[in-house]
Image (tube, grey):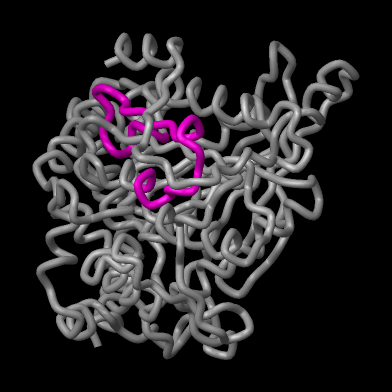
Amino acid sequence: MLYQIFETQRSLMEPFADFAQAASKLYGQTNSPIAQNPMAQRVSAGYDLLYRLGKDYEKPQFGIKSVEVEGTEVAIHERIEMDKPFCELRRFKRFTDDAATLTKLKAQPVVLIVAPLSGHYATLLRDTVRTMLKDHKVYITDWKNARLVPLSEGEFHLDDYVNYVQEFIRDLQAKYGNCHVMSVCQPTVPVLAAVSLMASRGEKTPITMTMMGGPIDATKSPTAVNNLAMNKSHSWFENNVIYRVPDSFPGAGRRVYPGFLQHTGFVAMNPDRHLKSHYDYFKDLIKGDNSSVDSHRDFYDEYNAVLDMDADYYLETINTVFQDFKLVRGTWEIKNSQGKLELVRPQDIRTTALLTVEGELDDISGSGQTEAAHKLCSGIVRQEHHHLEAKGAGHYGIFSGRRWRDVVYPHVKSFILEHNKGLGNGAVKAVATKPKAVVKKVSPAAKKIATAKK
């Protein structure tokens, strides 16, 4: 019922938002008689703010048209490589007519970026993708809004997420021989499970795994986000955040965790910060500070765009990752595409190098949660365990913004390149015996960058 009430309210607000947008433009036109009023700029700014607060935020576009590769502008063509009921495998294909640059592009590593399915769209990783495109062939998982998926497509479970990742990895392996996989935040857990299952079956595993800011072991340094998931029962989530999609959407009747509820939770974490941000936006509009205005709009166009998550997937994630800690306890069984249960055994991974990345100030995935992957992946030789803590970086800072570009990315780039050279099948020499301890290996250059940038 709550979902229907929200949609009714949104529909009623839509004409008011449209009016506010029109009024803002009317008062903001410098050649308009109305704009000659001394208060016109303030009125225009007020209407603009009302429009931004009341409008409906659709899925953003990646909008990456070109990148610079060693001084040469390279065109980007975005296309769907594989279309699954709940996810698209999206490729950013690079084009150039410069022969030397084309030769470099063909030789660069292939990276599958697994984006979070935890509220925001994959476009949240736009900066990650744009930066990676300079030195890699890039694919990304673009998860679909569950309210747009008809009931006829069936259910979506955490097991399906893991099976999707395996299918995408196999697809890239078939095309290129092997690939590297990078997971950001929530997908660190299902990606580790996917690679573990492939290793247990004796399948070829990715050359490297890069895991950034994810809850591999949520018992370590639990954050406010972790505590909510840990302290509420399964029935509480079932009764308080799960609703059926209204009839006005293709996914009518599907049980979901609605995006508007997720957005409310995001804002509730830092209400003062958002209030100040909107007030600053109002003042910037009056001052005519277009740079700050555009920056605010870009951020909230992304932040306010949220998708519905299938209820089965969401509830199973809460139970598996934050309540029963099945991955770290070794009790997680996943149903494969043939319907057979398989135990997740990270210790079976032997031919994949591991890099974990954490932000010093991360308030979503606490310190040590991602690094815990090293202890689980005890079958990987000691020298192939790598860890980086980005000083001064929060959760978003490890994959977006200046710290991502200046601190984290140089390390990720060198890690992937080092293991890609001379490895036609991406094999990393396996260890015969279990290592006694995890070795955190960080290159001298990366250490210098990490300590210098704050």
Magenta span covers which residues?
A: 373-399
Is 348 drawn above or below residue 441 in the view shown? below
Label tally: 0
What residue is rendered at 68% in x and 41% in y? 427
- Is 226 a magenta residue? no
What residue is rendered at 33% in x and 45% in y? 370
As rendered, which of 352 and 247 lies closer to the eye?
A: 352
In the image, 136: left or right of 284?
Answer: right
Q: Quadrant of the C terminus?
A: top left
Is 24 drawn above or below residue 409 in the view shown? below
- Is 377 a magenta residue? yes
In the image, 108: left or right of 45?
Answer: right
Spot occupied by residue 262 in the image (x, y as percentages of width and height) = 27, 63
As rendered, which of 113 and 176 lies closer to the eye?
A: 176
Q: Residue furthest front?
A: 433
In the image, 96: left or right of 272?
Answer: right
Whether residue 281 appears in this view of the structure is: yes
Is 334 drawn above or below residue 94 in the view shown? below
Residue 124 picture quarter: top left
Spot occupied by residue 197 in the image (x, y as percentages of width and height) = 55, 65
Whether residue 32 appears in this view of the structure is: no
Is 224 drawn above or below residue 331 in the view shown? above
